[in-house]
Image: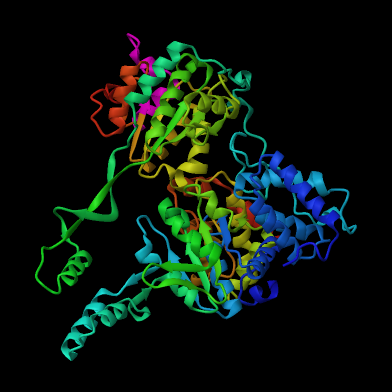
Amino acid sequence: MDVTSPKTPRADAALLGFARALRAAGVDASAERVYAFLRAVGELRPGMRADVYWAGRLTLCGGRDDLERYERVFAACFDGSAPDGRTTATAPPPRPRLVVRDGPVPRGPARPEHAPAPPAASLASSAEVLRHRDVAELDSADREQLRRLLAAFALRGETRRTARRRPARRGQVDPRRTVRELLRRGGEPARLRRHARTDRPRRVVLLVDISGSMAPYADALLRFAHAASRGSRAEVFTIGTRLTRVTRELTHRDPDLAMTALAAAVPDWRGGTRLGELLREFLDRWGQRGMARGAVVVLLSDGWERGDPELLGAQMRRLHRLAHRVIWANPRKARPGYAPLAAGMAAALPSVDAFVEGHSLAALERLAAVVAGAEPGLVEGAERA
Amino acid sequence: MRARLEETGYLVDDGLAVACFLALRLHRPIFCEGDAGVGKTALASALAEALGAPLIRLQCHEGIDASQALYDWDFPRQLLHLRAAEAAGVKDAERLESELYDRRFLVARPLLKALETQPSVLLVDEVDRADDEFEAFLLELLSEFSVTIPELGTLRAGTPPVVVLTSNRTREVHDALKRRCLYHWFDHPGFARELAIVRRRLPGVSARLAEQVTALVQELRSQDLLKPPGVAETIDWAQALDALGVDEVDAELAVATLGSVLKYREDAERARGLDLAAVLAGRGA
């Protein structure tokens, strides 16, 4: 399959330049994908704009989040210079933005006129300050604390039974291994081999509030999240004025690197809170599809909601129906005389299985124990609400 | 390609037509993502019908392993073979042993069956439901179209099967798997295309009913629902109304049959609050 034969090397160079531009825009267009792209274009009519468009979209993109970047780069690279003079009308219409961070996702792409108009009141825009936090340096006390956290937590969810079976001392007879054993001994009676269902830890989903009101705690909580997600496969999201999935950023083994990556990825440090709205976004985009199903979901937040507490209440009920267990860790709970009076907190509490503190190392250790299935013993907040 | 797919009653847009064409020419799997009920699985059966090839389906689930997906040795038959050989007084142990791991004692599970059936269309459905360890099994199959069995060697497909993978995005599928595939994202279709799909799928339904139902579903989709209805639900709804023997739907009847489109109580309540009559009037006029 000679890619270059029907075209000039210049055409190839243009395609490679396009791939490079895509890479710069954040699409992971590896050499293998680019090779597939060139082959695909070779198979199609290379001069046709729409064909190049689809060939690239099919081979270079690897996820829904890539598509929007692809549209943009494609328009920048090929608009106005359509190789054979075809009009731009052949290009599919631009789609709404699909990046996670960008507030509520418009539902049907077919109605851009409805999409970018969330009600102004719930934007908490007065507080939406996009601020990248500087974590260039950590002092020695921080490091010490981090080591302790890492040592203390591997956040393992409660276990659940799986469909898979493993050899075991007791349990049902495993016909396959028994027969194999018989065969090995030439048909002599042998011991029955048994197998049993295995247990697996449930998925843990951490939603960390990084809004202004949580500022004193956010840093420590994110380190906790890092420590927790290192041991098991926990999913981590940050909530502020936007919802950001930071699981990937936290996979760095080195905590400093992880925190730097996270600081670069999260655009809404110390802004306001739109708990209800973002919780809905989480459920729509991830939770209902399966991430929250049967999982242990932990919210680390003070429950100060800028938007409508009723929305938060409704979304919490939804979450409660999906998840195996919903745990709310509120650092302010430890203060003397604390009552869950913040409107959001009061609305959320009826759907919370365990309401714990989260202000100190000891409290976080207790949280880890609750996630692993221990009785919280501290659910008095639930009765209040 | 497009015409052949449309003959089977599956309507494709430009992107999907290009994807199918490339999948056939470059022997690359198509990786389909999108909301539920937008025709990801139906694509595989339409491809199978268009190519005149059997469809081999592997439904992924948690805990699926190689013996369920690739191949398995048929222990009872091997045992039987040994007994029979013993009864016949065969003494040549070495030959007997080599016979045991013969192709005829191998049970082909869907993936191996797809390699051996030519031509064929292989559908790996909901790959995101399988454990991530399982994706590793798929890698050799999807890039080389071969399966390595330690006792037998490597089995290779003469003409590679057309492979369709679908995912509902409950988790991110590993990049090593994705980059071997063509990626296609399924969007909900626009009014005209959805209407065409309904008409094609349900030729018995009156034109007016199909149009009304499609308009209603499009309106519902634009609402902020927990689970926006897919094309499959549109077809279900039209079918349900047709089964009631009506040619035209009014707001009352629409509410009564809402259960075939919306599967959440909150959604149904929300839809009842809408002015369905206005939608119908707007489209019917």
Say which quarter of the image contains residue B238: bottom right
Relative image position of residue B41 (x, y in whole percent): 52, 64
In this view, A83 is above or below A202:
below
Quadrant location, the C terminus of chain B: bottom right
Q: Residue at x 69, y 64 (%)?
A: B18
Relative image position of residue A202 (x, y in whole percent): 33, 42
Q: Residue at x 48, y 63 (%)?
A: B124
Give the colour scheme of this rendering: rainbow
Quadrant location, the N terminus of chain B: bottom right
Q: Is residue B233 visible?
A: yes
In this view, A130 is above or below B275:
above
**Residue A63 falls within the magenta-colored stretch:** no
Q: Nearer the viewer, residue A161 or A166?
A: A166
In this view, A221 is above or below A141:
below
Residue most toward the left? A189
Residue most toward the right? A85
Q: Nearer the viewer, residue B175 or A117?
A: B175
Task: Please give the count of numbered marks on the rendered protein.
Answer: 0
Looking at the image, residue B92 sits to the left or right of residue A105; the answer is left
Q: Nearer the viewer, residue B205 or B159?
A: B159
Relative image position of residue A10 (x, y in whole percent): 85, 54
**Residue A341 falls within the magenta-colored stretch:** yes
Say which quarter of the image contains residue A353: top left
Q: Nearer the viewer, residue A66 or B89?
A: B89
Relative image position of residue A183 (x, y in whole percent): 18, 72
Span highlighted in magenta in the image: A328-351
